[in-house]
Image (tube, rainbow, N blue to C red):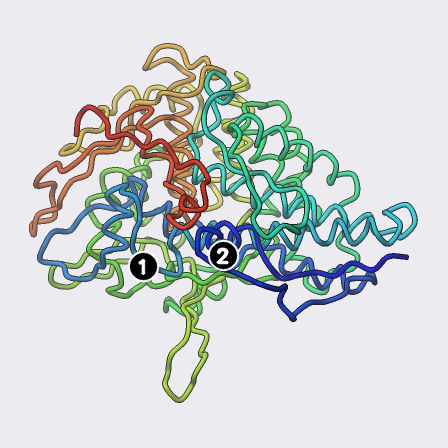
Amino acid sequence: MKKKIIYFISLVTLLSVVSCDKFLDRMPDNRATIDTQEKVQALLVSAYPGTDYMLLTEFMSDNVDDYGKNNPYTDRFIDQVYAWQDVTETDNEDPNHLWENSYIAIAAANQALQAIEEMGGVETTGMYAEMAEALLCRAYNHFILVNVFAMQYNALTADTDQGIPYIEEPETLLNPQYKRGTVAEVYAKINRDIQAALPYVSETYYTVPKYHFNTKAAYAFAARFYLYYEQYEKSVEYANKVLGSAPKSLLRDWTAQAAMTQDYEPIVNHYIDVTLNCNLLLMTAYSKMGLAFGPYRVYSKYAHGDYLANRETGIAITSLWGGSNNTYHMSMKVYSATNLDKTIFWKLPYLFEYTDPVARIGYYRTVYPAFSGDMVLLERAEANIILGNFDTAVDDINLWIRNIAQSPVELTKERIQSHFNNVSYSTWNQSTVKKHLNPAASVEMGEEGGLKECMLQCILALKRVESLGQGLRWFDVKRYDIEIQRRTISPAGIPEKMTDILLKRDMRRAVQIPPKVRDANLEPTLRETPVNQ
């Protein structure tokens, strides 16, 4: 049996440096032979991305405001991210690191798949579960890449919108040439990999299943993917497989968290507890999100402050069920000082990995739930709303609210419609929870003010609260083509000046691919300046 030699060269490394005069005159020496089941399993640990999308997408979304020139807690990297500019600054969470680490993870998944084949295939080796994990990791990493570096999937435009390279084989060439393809092509291949993987998912060989694509995590990924892919029946089908007949058992126990000592560390450590049923898949990453959305000054020039909380998000939405901030089992946390305002839910831990304990240098890290039972519940509700299953969606909405809030009023679809029809559409200086929606053609939303539009307003508002500080809001902003007005907040805590606007189909919604990758002749992202600039 032929043994496979793995060279630890990723797609991104090659794409990043082939434009130089010389890269390698010979192949490197750090190599490994993958010829046993145990080695394949060990390799798949590297198929999960080491860099997350959260900081990038959260600070591009409408979940942060600019607290003005008197707040110095920023840098050029986050300035560029907030302004939807091409990122030229270097940071561990910049687009280059996201691209690079995602393709490194994809390379590991592809190497595992090839090793299985060269050992005789799954029929001979019995490595069905390993194959499934590799396919899911490959699909997930491409899913994140296409949703960050391309426009959102829309059946009317996906056949022409730029995608990203979908890599299906281990890299063996020194100067590979790749094409971006289209968003439709990328989604079709993700669909193929998910469908090939799902029948064989198993957590039997995982030491800690919550850090791998266990069965519920795999179905949760499928539910989100098909929601974005505009295949709403499939999204509901896979969400049902996650939630089963007792969905409440998969939700976060907010009463337990509220009963804890209300200090940052115990709260965030509990939030990512591997034993909690709600945490379906946990991932680790080099990330400052625990600082940016924690009680720290880091990046607080752009923050989710009191104005957003009271007008658009956490506190504002409680009027839907007749409450105030105190109706949450665990209320939002306020961190403020001169020219500093954060009103947030504490979720993700701030961890530090020392590379030199003496010099006290190292990397910021965090742990985050890539998939949770709470979000699957809301995604199922969204899919059911689009399908017209309003009563079923209302049941899920009420379950989510009863779980997070104290003594809420039971909602009906009529109450939801009435509530949102009494709310004005948000403007830059008069914020509300309600923004104009411009969904994909597959969503027959009807007229503004109609039942479906009001139901969608409701579910998007709840998802915004559920995912606050975790980057997912940006994908809903893209999927519903929600316009964002950038503004500065005055020292009095109110909007002072509008500085920019992200329009419908604004090409800045697709992040520019890294400069080194463009230098290696991969087609740049089309991000022409909108007419309003």
Left or right: where does residue 124 sit relative to residue 118?
right
Between 367 and 524, the residue placed more toward the observer is 524
Q: In this figure, what is the number of numbered marks?
A: 2
The N terminus appears in which quarter of the rendering? bottom right
Tell me, for residue 368, which label it has, or none: 2
The C terminus appears in which quarter of the rendering? top left
Asked where in the image residue 445 lies, by quadrant, the reply is top left
Q: Residues within 10 Å of mark 1 (few under 14, many from 20)?
A: many
Q: Residue at x 37, y 40 (%)?
A: 511
Between 458 and 322, the residue placed more toward the observer is 458
Q: Check disc 1 and give the amino acid type.
A: Ala
Q: Residue at x 57, y 55 (%)?
A: 10
Q: In the displayed image of the protein, which residue is found farthest to the top?
A: 447
Q: Determine if residue 395 is in view.
A: no
Mark 1 or mark 2: name the one nearer the start of the chain: 1
The residue identified by callout 1 is 292
Q: Residue at x 51, y 19 (%)?
A: 155
Name the secondary structure under disc 1. helix
Task: Tell me residue 478's x, y (percent).
Answer: 39, 31
Q: Check disc 2 and give the amino acid type.
A: Tyr
Asked where in the image residue 143 lies, by quadrant, the reply is top right
Q: Contact, CB < 8 Å: mark 1 with mark 2? A: no
Name the secondary structure under disc 2. strand
Task: Tell me residue 268's x, y (percent).
Answer: 44, 63
- Compared with residue 426, is residue 347 higher up or lower down, i.e. above or below? below
